[in-house]
Image: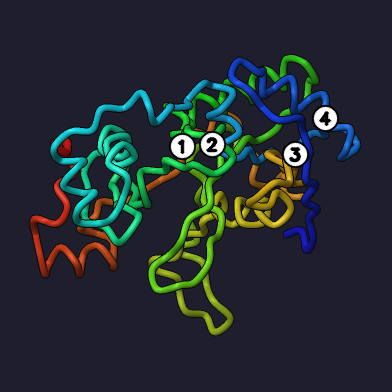
Amino acid sequence: MGSSFQVFGIKTKILIPGDDMAEIIIDESSQAGGILEGDIIAIAESGLATTEDAIVRLSDVTPSEKAYEYERMYKIDARLAEIVISESDSIAGGIPGFLLSLKSGTLLPNAGVDGSNAPPGCVVTLPKDPDESAKRIHDKILEKTGKETGVLVIDSRTHAMRLGCSGVAIGCYGVSAITDERGKKDLFGHELEVTRLAVGDNLASAAELVMGESDECTPVAIIRGLSKYISNGSSGVGSIEPSECLFMGVAMNSNPALIDKDRKTE
């Protein structure tokens, strides 16, 4: 097992719809000495979504009655609430300014809809298919450079009862986002029974440290020295059912109607 790795923040121009993210990564990779075999490339979801034109102008949104209800309950702009509703599988509740959404097997605030690094009066939604975006970028980098890499699409999230944000992988291709440690032995010979390593999330958090959250204009990071996690053809980030999650399982036992992932919010 390698005992060290490097993370390079890659600065770019301000991204706009229609930009070719793979070409930009290739062009700007000189900041890390180029793209090398086994590199893992982390891409901020907001920058990627911008290039894919996932930008919504608030003035174009007509709120529904449900959106106005959320505005009254949680002091969130009804137009933003309407976008969050459309981007969510269901809404679990909220706090002032935020709705807690279930989307694609994960809980997140406002379904990932964010006004940070968006043009004035606009918000950016998550990429429509982060795994497919990661594959497209991986394939073009392989075609142009001949280098086999892994690609992660990452976001920053808060976690239950913890202050601050850390990185999470929301899409991947060519890298093992989860590794199974079950069956291995600990220092005292006890067999691990449930442990899985969230490689994608750990790499995302490392990338977040060099990418920043404000005006750094660094939507890409190249992670070098962890080629053992490269896995040709691997795609997707695993999730579990709400009932199997410790946090959501407890909440659902208290209120079984809290989450119904098969029901699209009205």
Whole-percent x and y of residue 185?
A: 52, 72
Q: Earlier in the sequence, mark 3 or mark 2?
A: 3
Q: Amino acid at mark 2?
A: Cys
Mark in front: 4 vs 2:
4
Secondary structure state at the residue bearing disc 4: helix
Disc 4: which residue: 28
Q: CA distance from mark 3 to mark 1?
A: 18 Å
Residue at point 11% right, 69% down?
A: 254
Residue 223 visible, this orientation? yes
Q: Earlier in the sequence, mark 4 or mark 2?
A: 4
User: Is residue 230 found left or right of 95 in the rendered image?
Assistant: right
Disc 2: which residue: 172
Disc 3: which residue: 39
Q: Earlier in the sequence, mark 2 or mark 1?
A: 2
Which mark is on residue 236? 1
Quarter of the image where the C terminus is located? top left
Residue at point 91% right, 37% down?
A: 33
Q: CA distance from mark 3 to mark 2?
A: 13 Å
Residue sitting nearer the eye, 91 or 30? 91
Secondary structure state at the residue bearing disc 2: strand
Whole-percent x and y of residue 139?
A: 64, 19
